[in-house]
Image (spheres, grey):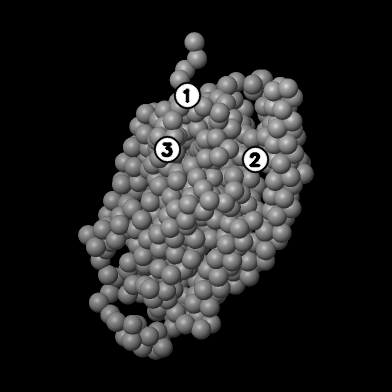
């Protein structure tokens, strides 16, 4: 006897719990945090370990993406999400006893965790959504997940207010005067934003607790598929058979066309979550703005949530809003955010503490908040396009499509982090903007073909139903 059909309320519960799990496990590390540890204990960890560690993480991320569809096929989306949350919890734990070997090991686990999480995320979403609700559910889960940015903002602000001690009781005019007299005074000793040991332990202690909560959330998440779901949760073929499908899908026409979208998501997200926050902290003019690390994620979170809710409403009114319309919005707002960074941030700030001036004007709390909101709007659109196109472009290999999207994204991030110690800021802002335009053009090609394929399938289904009625 079959189970009763599921309700829309059940779908919403699944989307909410998926988004809440994302909220719990996502955190990021600033290069300036590692730099602060290095300045106090140079023998413990390299000052560029933040960049190199993330490069190592993305290498494991790429390798994991090759095997994650096979793992999903064996254990299902719910348990792959639980395993990913365990991997995420290992990373903040290492900041209680900073050790270079454990740091890189935890980065490797984190990379594998990312591969598992996004594979499980895509599998769980397609097994708990129908064709009519996929766009809405994707953005509901995304908006809830992005609350983590607002919570992170509150955590940064709270920890900073409790634990941050100014390096010197000097104002900016005194700093400028001292440096004009002695340029070799040792800028990094007291001008850049420093994180104390107490701040670091408090920050990553909270992140570790949230990761544990994420594990509990995924254990409690409903496992039953919704009625008429896009992709049922059931084992198909063998582990190596699924791996072979992943390899062949790598060179599928749709995946090659979408390579530009997937890779630009990697380069842009790495820039926004690591390189630009580091650039803010290394800019001497921001010396007195100790809450920048709180204002910035607050802006991103508000932008992400606003746009996710907007797309959810528009998707209910207009079919395929997450195709061409969302892609145009994502490209325009993302490029606008890069322009704002380009004119307000010193060119060498991603690499070292700098006193160089920006092209037009410097940072302020309001302007950083505005950059965050603009970025959040663009990023939400691009990620919504990615999630929906992966669910629909390859109906017979959806798990592989989600995996390959993250593999190419990780490739973009990996290349960026290996080159980040030598690339000036303006190469990022101009290069990624051009990359976005190319990605939009190729996305339109794939989206149009996918729409035509769906129309053809709908027409064939209609003919079959008429023949059955006759």
Contact check, label 3 and label 2, Cβ < 8 Å: no
- Give the residue number, with chain letter if any, for mark 1: 5
The numbered dot on residue 322 is none
The numbered dot on residue 392 is 2
Q: Residues within 10 Å of mark 1 (few under 14, many from 20)?
A: few
Q: Nearer the viewer, mark 2 or mark 1?
A: 1
Give the Cα distance between marks 3 and 2. 20 Å
Q: Residues within 10 Å of mark 2 (few under 14, many from 20)?
A: many
Left of 341 or right of it: where is 65? right
Task: Please tell me whether mark 1 sits on a helix, a strand or a loop.
Answer: loop
Q: Nearer the viewer, residue 48 or 290?
A: 290
Q: Residue at x 76, y 41 (%)?
A: 251
Find residue 32 and report its horizontal and vertical position in percent: 42, 61
Q: Nearer the viewer, mark 3 or mark 1?
A: 1
User: Which tag, 2 or 1, sits closer to the chain's start?
Assistant: 1
Task: Please tell me whether mark 2 sits on a helix, a strand or a loop.
Answer: helix
Residue sitting at the far left: 162
Left of 426 or right of it: where is 357? left
Does 445 sit above or below residue 299? above
User: Which tag, 3 or 2, sits closer to the chain's start?
Assistant: 3
Give the Cα distance between marks 2 and 1. 23 Å
């Amino acid at each position: 006897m079959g189970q009763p059909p599921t309700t829309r309320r059940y779908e919403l519960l699944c989307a909410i719990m998926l988004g809440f799990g994302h909220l719990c496990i996502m955190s990021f590390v600033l290069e300036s945090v590692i730099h602060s540890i290095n300045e106090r204990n140079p023998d413990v960890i390299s000052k560029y370990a933040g960049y190199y560690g993330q490069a190592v993480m993305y290498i494991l991320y790429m390798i994991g993406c090759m095997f994650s569809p096979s793992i999903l096929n064996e254990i299902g989306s719910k348990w792959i999400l639980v395993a990913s949350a365990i991997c995420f919890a290992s990373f903040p734990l290492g900041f209680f006893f900073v050790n270079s070997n454990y740091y890189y090991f935890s980065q490797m686990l984190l990379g594998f965790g990312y591969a598992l999480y996004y594979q499980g995320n895509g599998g769980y979403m397609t097994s708990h959504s129908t064709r009519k609700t996929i766009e809405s559910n994707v953005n509901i889960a995304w908006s809830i997940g992005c609350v983590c940015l607002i919570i992170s903002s509150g955590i940064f602000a709270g920890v900073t207010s409790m634990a941050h001690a100014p390096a010197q009781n000097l104002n900016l005019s005194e700093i400028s005067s001292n440096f004009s007299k002695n340029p070799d005074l040792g800028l990094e000793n007291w001008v850049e934003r420093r994180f104390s040991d107490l701040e670091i332990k408090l920050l990553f202690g909270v992140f570790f607790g949230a990761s544990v909560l994420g594990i509990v959330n995924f254990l409690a998440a409903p496992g039953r598929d919704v009625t008429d779901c896009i992709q049922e949760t059931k084992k198909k073929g063998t582990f190596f058979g699924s791996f072979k499908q992943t390899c062949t899908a790598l060179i599928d026409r749709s995946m090659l066309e979408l390579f530009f979208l997937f890779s630009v998501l990697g380069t842009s997200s790495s820039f926004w979550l690591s390189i630009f926050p580091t650039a803010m902290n290394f800019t001497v003019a921001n010396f007195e703005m100790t809450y920048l690390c709180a204002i910035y994620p607050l802006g991103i979170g508000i932008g992400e949530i606003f746009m996710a809710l907007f797309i959810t409403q528009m998707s209910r009114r207009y079919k395929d809003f997450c195709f061409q319309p969302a892609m145009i919005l994502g490209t325009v707002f993302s490029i606008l955010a890069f322009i704002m960074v380009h004119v307000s941030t010193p060119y060498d700030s991603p690499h070292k503490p700098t006193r160089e001036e920006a092209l037009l004007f410097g940072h302020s709390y309001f302007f950083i908040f505005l950059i965050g909101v603009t970025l959040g709007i663009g990023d939400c659109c691009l990620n919504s396009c990615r999630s929906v196109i992966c669910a629909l472009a390859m109906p017979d290999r959806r798990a592989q499509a989600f995996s390959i999207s993250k593999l190419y994204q990780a490739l973009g991030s990996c290349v960026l982090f290996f080159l980040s110690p030598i690339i000036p800021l303006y190469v990022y802002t101009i290069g990624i903007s051009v990359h976005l335009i190319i990605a939009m053009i190729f996305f339109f090609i794939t989206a149009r073909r996918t729409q035509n394929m769906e129309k053809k399938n709908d027409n064939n289904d209609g003919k079959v139903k008429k023949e059955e009625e006759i």
